[in-house]
Amino acid sequence: MPDKRIEIKATRYDPATDEKPHLQSYDIPFYDESMVVLDALNHIKSHVDGSLSYRWSCRMGICGSCGMMVNGTPKLTCNAFLRDYWPRAIIVEPLNNFPIIRDLVIDMEDFMRKLKSIKPWIIRKQELPLGAGEHYQTNEQIDDFRQFSECINCMLCYAACPVYGLNNEFLGPAATALARRYNLDSRDQGLKERLPVIADPEGVWECSFVGECSVVCPKGVDPAKAIQQTKLDTTMRFVLPYGNRD
Amino acid sequence: MAPPADAAKYASEVGGQTLLVDFESYDVLVVGGGLAGIRAAIAAVEANPRVKVGMVSKVYPMRSHTVSAEGGAAAALRPEDSYEKHAFDTIKGSDYLADQDVVEAFVREAPLEIIQMEHWGCPWSRDPDGKISARPFGGMTTWRTCFAADKTGFHMLHAVFQTSLKYPQIVRHDESFVTKLLVEDSRCVGVVALDIRTGRFDAITAKSVILATGGLGRVYAFTTNGNICTGDGMALAYRAGAGLKDMEMVQFHPTGLPFTGILITEAVRGEGGYLLNNEGDRFLKRYVPNKMELGPRDIISRAMITEFEEGRGFDGPHGKYMHLDVRHLGEKVIDRKLPFMRELGREFVGIDIVHEPIPVRPVQHYMMGGVDAEISGKTEILGLYAAGECANVGLNGGNRLGSNSLSECLVFGAAAGRAAAQYASSAKPVSANPVDAMLWDEARRVESEYLEKKGGQERIGPIREEMQREMDAGAGVFRTKEALSRLARNLGGLRERFEKVKIDDSSRTFNTEIVAALELDFMLEVSSTVVFSALAREESRGAHARRDFPERDDAKFLKHTVCFHTNTLAPRIEYSDVHITTFQPQARTY
């Protein structure tokens, strides 16, 4: 099929010259069934229009850079196959709910602040010295938090979250899932330090349990579950004596 | 733009361009936010809590290519293992080009670093008793590869990055691209960096600088490496006068997915997977009979190419391939030990590896060569250090063993961080005037070469693609004088075309085309060092296989190749001695 082609409509926006974002159409060759939306963008940038800006790196669904709206759904573009859309056009836009820096590039500084705010590191009353070796932990104990540790910070869940869309003070899905990841880790004793952030009115309580975050997650993380568990946990801490564990 | 007399930090605007100079930025500046860079930053702070550390990275740190490492990190942690065994495996794996004192120090530090990562929250997979588990890996004689399922790099990077957030002394400059090292009186005193988001040029000064920018895989077309692996740190150091060591030593991993080059981890074979040719034959019995699928990467990649050439590969739409078969392991083992491989197969190939073999072929993966550095990361330039894949401290020689590189990032990242912090504590402050002029010159250079240039017709994309195809063809698994010489000429032609490059994007905001141009400039630079180093090494050793010189030649080439920058495409090549302590070179058979 040497002549197969596909239309890509991509958001263009330069804050210096454009009042608001608009779509630009590109007709590009669809020369291999393995092509993904990211390949199409790379073709445009290399051969048609070098000024199109977007982020990407690993092209294997693990670095989390290339999240964009693909026909209205948040996707990793390295993993969105053209064959699933062809012969229709594909509209590629920056992730919803974030300020746009340029073209398909969003401003994610808000998440970087939120990530830091939940103290995403092992907190212990007393650090084990290196010479004492590792903390013992069974694979079953890892299973308690494993899925929440799989978050690649791709921001798809924030793009899908209607609450974050209305109120960006909301801690949001990925940051809550990562807080949960540490709170459930048998090596960690930092729940009390994280509680003020996650139990804040802008923390988990803001979530209206739409569950879209878990639907769009490309890594099978279930942030909605993390949020509901955290709600339960924070309630239990206040009403039940055993809830006051460290 | 005369600076205010007493200002330590000021911004100025000239010709629509903002320049920011900061004369007392940092004690230690780390370039690169992957595993080696972050480990270095934390080590610097832990060595001296008063040290101010900057970290400049062209991407957010968690996007760094460490994230794609899969199989594991090697360390002699188990009772049946020993430092000596790990050292010998590494040295034999290197085809005796590793510096043995460096290897001996590495194997002692690696277990401590694995424990450190455990304390920082890395979810290492565990044995039933709760201890950190290990799996077999290529070229290793015992189980010593610690792993977090098959996303080890991802988990290590996120653990160390998230841990780094607790240190207020570490200040990040995310999405900033370093274009030049500031060198004053033969001492590195910082960098010039393009802030990608704003288009501003910053002089970020520091008493010491650590390069931790990773590899250069993107000089090849078929590579496991992400888009960001463009040899930046190597090119920066090379242009500043440091040597690049053993650049001919490029690792080709046996198992990449055709078309994309996505890595299928060696752990697939570690867990018992078979490599099969088109006759259903475990062909490695003819090449590495004692190790089979757990032979070293250089030899297995050559075996696969040889099988292809003799007609025993499968033919596919994206070239020849072999089968990597894990069906006999069963779903339970695959889901526990190799879940990401199942996901990659499903998502990117459309197969379930529980029921179907995985198509694979050799793919560029890692650079043994890099910035010539001592065991502490110290380079020939005062105040400049290097660690991780962009460095060559002498650990990997002619061929790196799988799972030694994550440990390398930890051990040598930490060493460089400590050494740089110590040097910074006694180093003189950075003086203002030359930095000011250097920033101005560098900003003008980038402006005039790319943004303001009129009349160029060449595009970046086609030049980059041609470079990548040429490198695949001329500097791949097997090399000859003829192909390398042709490649050298063609790289010269591409450099001439690059001088006429035209940028479409005139915006100052998040201009990724100018970043791509700067990266291509660096890639053309480091490609030439690969080619000329490979031409000069007239023997076959480790990953460097010359069809015209098929034997290892210890009398002539038990030496490191060191390239220095000249005004032409061809570097000046010198040789330095390999440090041999315990293990005398012997024939390398498996």
Image: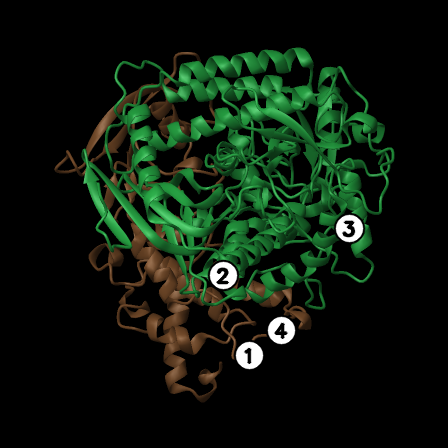
Chain colours: A brown, B green
The alpha-carbon separation of the residues under discs 3 and 2 comes to 35 Å
Closer-to-camera residue (B38/B394): B394
Report whether B182 appears left or right of A23.
right
Q: Amino acid at mark 4?
A: Pro
* Whether labels 3 and 2 share one chain: yes
* Whether labels 1 and 2 share one chain: no
Quadrant holding the N terminus of chain B: top left
Q: Nearer the viewer, mark 1 or mark 2?
A: 2
Q: Nearer the viewer, mark 4 or mark 2?
A: 2
* Whether labels 3 and 4 share one chain: no
Tell me the crowding category of disc 1: few under 14, some 14 to 19, or many 20 or more residues within 10 angstroms, Cα based: few
Let me know if residue B252 appears in the view. yes
Disc 2 secondary structure class: helix
Q: Amino acid at mark 1?
A: Gln
Q: Earlier in the sequence, mark 3 or mark 2?
A: 3
Chain of the residue displaying label 1: A
Tell me where residue B379 sits by quadrant. top right
Tell me the crowding category of disc 2: few under 14, some 14 to 19, or many 20 or more residues within 10 angstroms, Cα based: some
The alpha-carbon separation of the residues under discs 4 and 2 comes to 26 Å
Disc 4 secondary structure class: loop
Residue under the point 32% across and 68% down = A204
Chain of the residue displaying label 3: B
Q: Which residue is mark 1?
A: A126
Closer-to-camera residue (B571/A70): B571
Residue under the point 64% across and 63% down = B115
Q: Which residue is mark 3?
A: B86
The alpha-carbon separation of the residues under discs 1 and 2 comes to 29 Å
Where does residue B44 sit, x and y in percent of width and height? 51, 60
Tell me the crowding category of disc 4: few under 14, some 14 to 19, or many 20 or more residues within 10 angstroms, Cα based: few
Q: Amino acid at mark 3?
A: His
Q: What mark, if any, has residue A129 been given in the picture? A: 4
